[in-house]
Image (tube, rainbow, N blue to C red):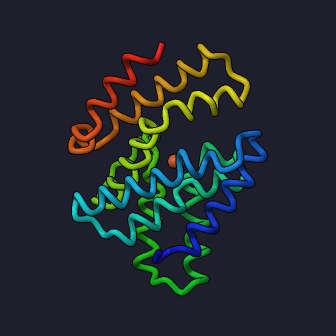
């Protein structure tokens, strides 16, 4: 595995995060981070994007959140800076780092930023796709945070609607059947 060091770093940090969020340890890695990385790599291949940029950005995309959930609102901006710090120290070229940073900064479906590169689209779409893949985990996560079933359901439904709406047309096509099924199942 090419970026094993960074997989290990994020997996470790996500397990610390799970403990602070009172979640099952390993949950965030298994149901969010790894699916995002895998979806991003799959899309990079499908759409002809730079796979190294996409994979690295997917690995780090929620890093700021994992370090401190208080960073949630700005985790896309802070995460890009944090990734730069790590990658600079490890000798990556600034040009590569800048592309990774752009993908991290623009990964959020809820923050409407214009996406300029196919790599940015791959990471943002992969993040959005993972919300559909892990809709049950999302409901559980909101319940862990203390929400009622109705509140959790409402939150997840809105999140998935927003995620789907912000996907590229090609990724919407890929996910259409799953999206329609989820919308039928949620309250
Ligand atoms: Fe995020
Ligand atoms: Fe994410």
Write down the quadrant of residue 95 in the picture.
bottom left
Residue 10: x, y in percent? Answer: 62, 62
Q: Residue at x 31, y 70 (%)?
A: 50
Q: Is residue 33 above or below residue 183?
A: below
Write down the quadrant of residue 7 in the picture.
bottom right
Residue 156: x, y in percent? Answer: 51, 26
Q: Residue at x 42, y 62 (%)?
A: 102
Q: Is residue 184 above or below residue 4?
A: above
Residue 129: x, y in percent? Answer: 39, 42
Q: Is residue 113 above or below residue 53?
A: above
Q: Residue at x 66, y 54 (%)?
A: 14
Q: How many marks?
A: 0
Q: Residue at x 46, y 67 (%)?
A: 56
Q: Is residue 48 above or below residue 97?
A: above
Q: Is residue 149 left or right of residue 24?
A: left
The residue sitting at the bottom extreme is 91
Q: Nearer the viewer, residue 148 or 159?
A: 148
Residue 40: x, y in percent? Answer: 38, 56
Q: Is residue 127 left or right of residue 80?
A: left
Q: Nearer the viewer, residue 121 or 171?
A: 171
């Amino acid at each position: 595995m090419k970026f094993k060091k960074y997989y290990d770093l994020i997996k470790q940090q996500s397990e610390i995060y799970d403990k602070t969020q009172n979640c099952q340890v390993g949950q965030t890695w298994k149901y969010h981070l790894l699916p995002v990385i895998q979806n991003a790599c799959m899309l990079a291949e499908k759409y002809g994007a730079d796979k190294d940029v996409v994979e690295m950005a997917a690995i780090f995309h929620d890093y700021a959140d994992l370090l401190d959930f208080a960073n949630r609102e700005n985790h896309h901006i802070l995460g890009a800076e944090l990734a730069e710090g790590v990658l600079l120290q490890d000798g990556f070229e600034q040009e590569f780092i800048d592309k990774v940073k752009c993908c991290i900064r623009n990964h959020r479906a809820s923050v409407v930023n214009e996406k300029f590169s196919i790599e940015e689209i791959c990471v943002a779409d992969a993040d959005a796709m993972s919300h559909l893949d892990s809709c049950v985990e999302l409901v559980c996560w909101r319940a862990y945070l203390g929400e009622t079933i109705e509140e959790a359901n409402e939150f997840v439904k809105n999140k998935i609607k927003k995620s789907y709406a912000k996907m590229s047309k090609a990724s919407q096509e890929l996910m259409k059947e799953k999206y329609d099924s989820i919308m039928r199942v949620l309250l």
